[in-house]
Image (cartoon, helix red, strand yellow):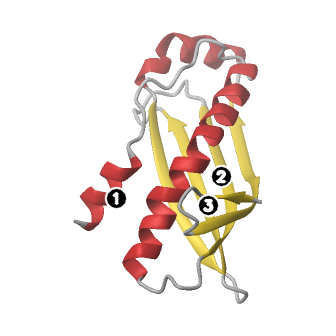
Amino acid sequence: MTKSKDEKFKIILEYIKDLSIETPSATTLLFVRENISKYNLDIDISSLAFKNKFLEVTTKLILQDKSENKNKAFFEIKYAAVISIDENIKDKKEISKIVLCDLQKVVYPKLEVIFLDLIRKSGYPELNIEKKIDFEQLYNDKFN
């Protein structure tokens, strides 16, 4: 069990919920290696409440080429964290900040390492994610 720095939430467990790496052919692999810079990383965060006051938060990363190109690979991971939130926290905005920002600051670095490692071992050894996600900024842009 991982405790957050400010004790607003505790991570009970973390796991890979779903994983998809699709490279249809060797031709696609070679093409994508040369064009991987055109791929975009998208993130989606969702949560599901359990009766026992736990939340399952799923962070989904998708790395894909959104162009009409036929030679494409597809990479997606769903990483789940089950958390408990301090029982004194009732404000929905504060809970949203925990889910979308505070938890992500803890979970995302691990998720990124796992995702990149799997993709690299799937035939794309040069792949890096240059742009880092600023969860604080994303949260503020969405809610302030």
What residue is pinned by disc 3?
Answer: 58
Q: Given the current orientation, which residue lies at the most extreme front position?
A: 6
What residue is pinned by disc 1?
Answer: 139
Q: Position of residue 50 (x, y in %)?
A: 69, 83
Please say if 141 is above or below 26: below
Please say if 27 is above or below 116: above
- Write the residue at 71% across / 15% down: 26
Secondary structure type for disc 2? strand
Q: Position of residue 107 (x, y in %)?
A: 61, 49
Please say if 144 is above or below 71: below
- Whichever of labels 2 and 3 marks the residue nearer the N terminus, that label is 3
Secondary structure type for disc 1? helix
Q: Identify the amino acid type marked 2.
A: Lys
Q: Identify the amino acid type marked 3.
A: Thr
Q: Position of residue 15 (x, y in %)?
A: 77, 53
- Write the residue at 58% across / 66% down: 7
Locate residue 98 relative to residue 120 in the image: left or right.
left
- Whichever of labels 3 and 1 marks the residue nearer the N terminus, that label is 3
Q: Which mark is residue 78?
A: 2
Q: In this rendered view, identify the residue nearer to me: 40 or 103.
A: 103
